[in-house]
Amino acid sequence: MKIVTINTDKTQNIFEELNKNFGGKVTYDLDEYTLEVDNNFATGSIVGASFNDNISYVQFDMTFFDDARMDILNLKSSPIYFAYCSQGNLSHSFGSKGEERKLKTFQTAIVTSKEKMDNVLFFDKNKKTKFTLIIVGTQVDPQKQLHSLNQKVKETFFDDNLPQDFFYIGSYNLKIAEKIEQLNSVTQTGIVRNLLKEGVLRIILAMEIQQHTDDLNALEKDANCLTLREMEEIKELSEFIKANPEEPFTIKSLSKKSGLSPNKLQEGFKMIHNRTVNDYITHMRVLKAEILIRTSDLNISEIVYCIGFTSRSYFSKIFKQKFNCSPKEYKFNLNPLAITA
């Protein structure tokens, strides 16, 4: 087993240790580090950055060809770690001999420990693992304590304000996975990239804290929860609809394709997208129509029928609800000479 020891005080230190142990190449862009690895031990990438309020993150998209263990040291303070697994799974323990607890796909873990107690992560070999670790430092400037985000997070999890061994695993949540995909889709560079990523990261942090609150407040936590397999089916269906919104989908055909009952389909889409299945299909068709209006030479009528609508008036109504103008007005605002419908 490969054992890596890292100190989370500084993002630079993390990547120096990772690079020393995994090899590969480190690149740097305004407080964001990227390690690309492709060798006999592992393949993939690790990305990390630091932001205001002593918040940082490290994101793994890795496949290890041998079992790997990562010891995260708390030398000066005990940060609170918010971990989300987007693919695969990994295990955590307090210290190398502590009880191992598994974090599965689409689950959040919130972890912290007593000072000088290591948090240990275990990765399985030959399995692609994608997970995001948000690190919130608990050291607070006394002059900023009243309004500090770090202080508020600390108070949320510790009544006496003193770090202690704490481990929470949340119920499955695909909304966080979608927000992490948004974090990864930022293509800008420099200060713009930094600001955009910080904004999305704070939303993810809020969602993970809200997940903890919702789970605690649920009277019957598992009564309406989907299983991991059901969550994966819903995610796959969502991506399929997004890629092919013009298809003549029905609840029956989607139920057959996924192996889920109509009730499970509706439950999953409402939980993940806050929409019914049909509303999600309609939403994706309107988004596809907007892209075609911007990028194709098709007139409005042609677009209506090629994305699966049968009524131009109905399409115009829902398009206006989303974009605050009719499709014709939208196209005119893009190019006054392009109106042919």
Image (tube, rainbow, N blue to C red):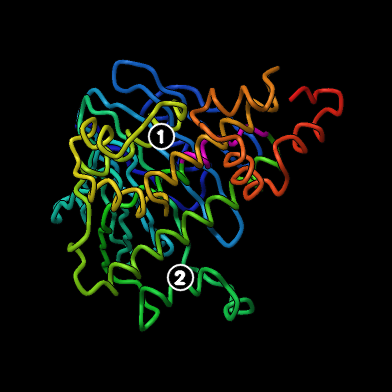
Residue 185 lies in magenta, yes or no?
A: yes
Find the distance from the CA under tag 1 to the CA under tag 2: 28 Å
Q: Residues within 10 Å of mark 1 (few under 14, many from 20)?
A: some
Q: Label 2 belongs to which residue? A: 153
Q: Quarter-wise, where is residue 220 in the image? A: bottom left
> Is 284 situated left or right of 193 in this image?
left
Residue that appears at 29% across and 29% down: 128
> In front here: 272 or 260?
260
Q: Quarter-wise, where is residue 192 in the image? A: top right
Q: Secondary structure at mark 1?
A: helix
For the N terminus, give its image quadrant. Answer: top left
Query: Please, is residue 20 above or below residue 105 in the view?
Result: above
> In front here: 239 or 337?
337
Q: Are marks 1 and 2 in contact (CB under 8 Å)?
A: no
Residue that appears at 28% across and 60% down: 117
Q: Secondary structure at mark 2?
A: helix
For the C terminus, give its image quadrant. Answer: top right
x, y percentage for residue 135? 44, 55
> In front here: 202 or 190?
202
x, y percentage for residue 173? 33, 52
Residue 57 lies in magenta, yes or no?
A: no
Q: What amino acid type should be assigned to the residue bearing mark 1?
A: Leu
Residue that appears at 76% across and 32% down: 331
Q: What amino acid type should be assigned to the residue bearing mark 2?
A: Val
First along the sequence among labels 1 and 2: 1
x, y percentage for residue 261? 19, 44
Q: Label 1 belongs to which residue? A: 18
Residue extent of the magenta highlight: 181-188
> Is 144 situated left or right of 341 in this image?
left
